[in-house]
Image (cartoon, rainbow, N blue to C red):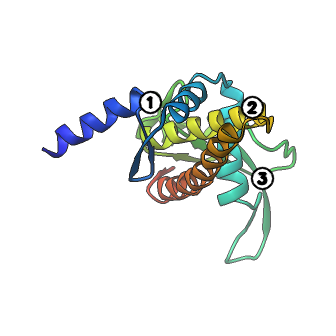
Amino acid sequence: LKANIAASLDRLERQNKIVRNGEIYQFLTKAEQDVTRAIKQTDISSSEENKYLITIVYKDILVDNKYRHDKNSNIYNVMRMLDGHMVDSATNAEITFEIITQRNENYEAFTEGYCLTKSNDNGGKIIVKLGVDKPLFNDLTMHIKTDTYIRKNNDGNNPEHQRILHEKSTENSERAKRIKAGFEKLLLNADYY
């Protein structure tokens, strides 16, 4: 029964009849369905997704780009990377910290043996392989699409449309909180090499 309900909810969501906000599903009016459909059709680039992912991981969660060693109190500069892309241009970094996500085109190649080998490259680096969480990454994409749609279509001419955009903005704020919490959980449960 639970599987049938989940399948029905997924179908209704794909048809833009309902919207999911966390664990809450809401039926949509015709106008809300049109906006939801337009949001889902909004084009975004992979660089926009990378930029948002970097913001969440390295600006909201792992803020500091320095590491202080507990035993000797030395402070080390850290070069931060995400899926093979440098986040910082730290030319004097003593430590490299790379996070691998399911968005990495070679994600499956990052086996334990491969990660251990890569962690010894170029004087060593810390590799953090996050687990797979498709709903979280879908939320990340939907957050960017919603934000982009609202920015491009917030003209203030139609009160009904403005109300819908305001509701979508509120939903997106809640989505952003869930995304941050989801990445905190992925980081806690990640494989570190």
The residue at 33%/34% (across/down) is 10
Instruction: Tell me if I can see residue 124 in this picture.
Output: no
Quarter assignment of residue 7: top left
In the picture, measured across the screen, residue 156 lies left or right of residue 169, that is: right
Classed neighbour count for the residue bearing mark 1: other residues with Cα under 10 Å, few (<14), some (14–19), many (≥20): many
* Residue 73 position within the rendered picture, expressed as x and y whole percent measured from the top left: 76, 76
Classed neighbour count for the residue bearing mark 2: other residues with Cα under 10 Å, few (<14), some (14–19), many (≥20): few
Question: Which disc, if any, is residue 16?
Answer: 1
- Relative to 39, does residue 71 appear above or below in the rendering? below
- Relative to 45, does residue 22 appear above or below in the rendering? below
Q: Which residue is mark 3?
A: 94
Distance of mark 1 from mark 3, alpha carbons?
Answer: 49 Å
In the picture, measured across the screen, residue 68 lies left or right of residue 89, that is: left
Classed neighbour count for the residue bearing mark 3: other residues with Cα under 10 Å, few (<14), some (14–19), many (≥20): some
Mark 3, mark 2: which one is toward the viewer? 2
Label whose residue precedes the other's in the sequence (1 or 3): 1
Q: Quadrant of the N terminus?
A: top left
In the picture, measured across the screen, residue 56 lies left or right of residue 102, that is: right
